[in-house]
Image (cartoon, rainbow, N blue to C red):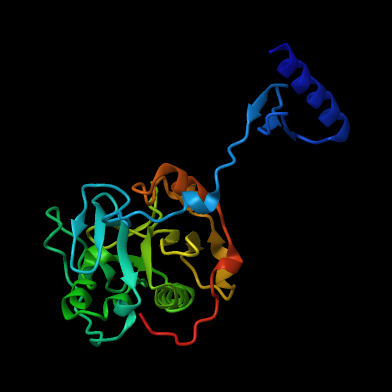
Amino acid sequence: MKKLVFFLWALSVGLNCLGQQKATTEAGKKVMLKADGTWSYINTKDTAAILKPVPIDKLEIPFSNVISHTGYSFSYNETHEQADWVAYELTKEKTKKMVKRKDHFRPDSAVKTGTATNKDYEKSGYDRGHLAPSADMCWSFTAMDESFYFSNMSPQNPSFNRGIWSKLEALVRSWAAENESIYIVTGPVLTEGLPTIGDNKVSVPQYFYKVILDYTEPDIKGIGFILPNAASSESLQKFAVSIDSVENFTGIDFFPLLPDEQEKIIEKKLCIPCWTWKVAKTEED
């Protein structure tokens, strides 16, 4: 014991002189010098081994108490008269266009407290912005039709909805095709004091977010986006952040069903080069 204490003390002195913070004991253990002068062992688990996919049903769902439709699930916020989040899995197969878009905006009877209506948006200056885009639901007539429920809408600046938001949606579809399958959670950032539209007082968000998880080998990865509800000519990469950052901004715990060690690794990392940023074909939402 005295030998170990002396050895660590010697390492401490030596490392302080060299300005380093890590060392290896005689037993081959990795140790790190903390700010308070104490040592702790470093976790040397293989990241690749940790990031081994395991079967998880409904991985995309942030938490329980949700409403589900054919193509997506959501959690409704009655105070703001829209969803806190909308979540779904998008596979390569589902990106194939099987049905055409047919606008059928209407209230969602699955929300017992009621949703917004067309009247709320009339002459408001805002688009009925999809959260789960209709183009992501083109694999099924029912999924496409249900994407026009007002529970899947949020007031969006027209230049935002038809501009950079549409570009992000197209990029995410291309990622689904490229990576075989991805999990998507998207929604408005809902806070107190937001302006509202219509008799139902539908809140107008200042920001929207989207988080994406590629849970397929060999490159398991995640990424998030936070965008202002406004026109922008910036590159989408400018708005890319870690999933942890989106969690801190929204207060939502994304992908909570992931094993804890995997969640920590995936959600804290932002790897821009890990994703393809060119969309060959852009589809309109």
Quadrant of the drawing holding the C terminus? bottom left
Judging depth in this view, the residue of 165 and 215 nearest the camera is 215
Quadrant of the drawing holding the N terminus? top right
Does residue 121 lie above or below 84 as drawn?
A: below
Place of residue 173 in the rendered image (x, y in percent of width and height, measured from the top left)? 40, 76
Q: Residue at x 66, y 32 (%)?
A: 29
In the image, is 56 to the left or to the right of 194?
left
Q: In which quarter of the view is residue 141 placed?
A: bottom left
Place of residue 218 in the rendered image (x, y in percent of width and height, measured from the top left)? 48, 65
Residue 139 in sight here: yes
Q: Residue at x 43, y 72 (%)?
A: 179
Q: Residue at x 23, y 69 (%)?
A: 71
Place of residue 22 in the rendered image (x, y in percent of width and height, measured from the top left)? 73, 35
- Of all residues, the one furthest to the right in this rendering is 17
Judging depth in this view, the residue of 80 and 130 nearest the camera is 130
Q: In which quarter of the view is residue 7 placed?
A: top right
Q: Residue at x 22, y 73 (%)?
A: 148
Place of residue 63 in the rendered image (x, y in percent of width and height, measured from the top left)? 29, 47
Judging depth in this view, the residue of 82 and 224 nearest the camera is 224
Q: In which quarter of the view is residue 17 placed?
A: top right
In the image, is 217 to the left or to the right of 185?
right
Judging depth in this view, the residue of 187 and 4 nearest the camera is 4
In the image, is 256 to the left or to the right of 223?
left
Does residue 237 lie above or below 39 as drawn?
A: below
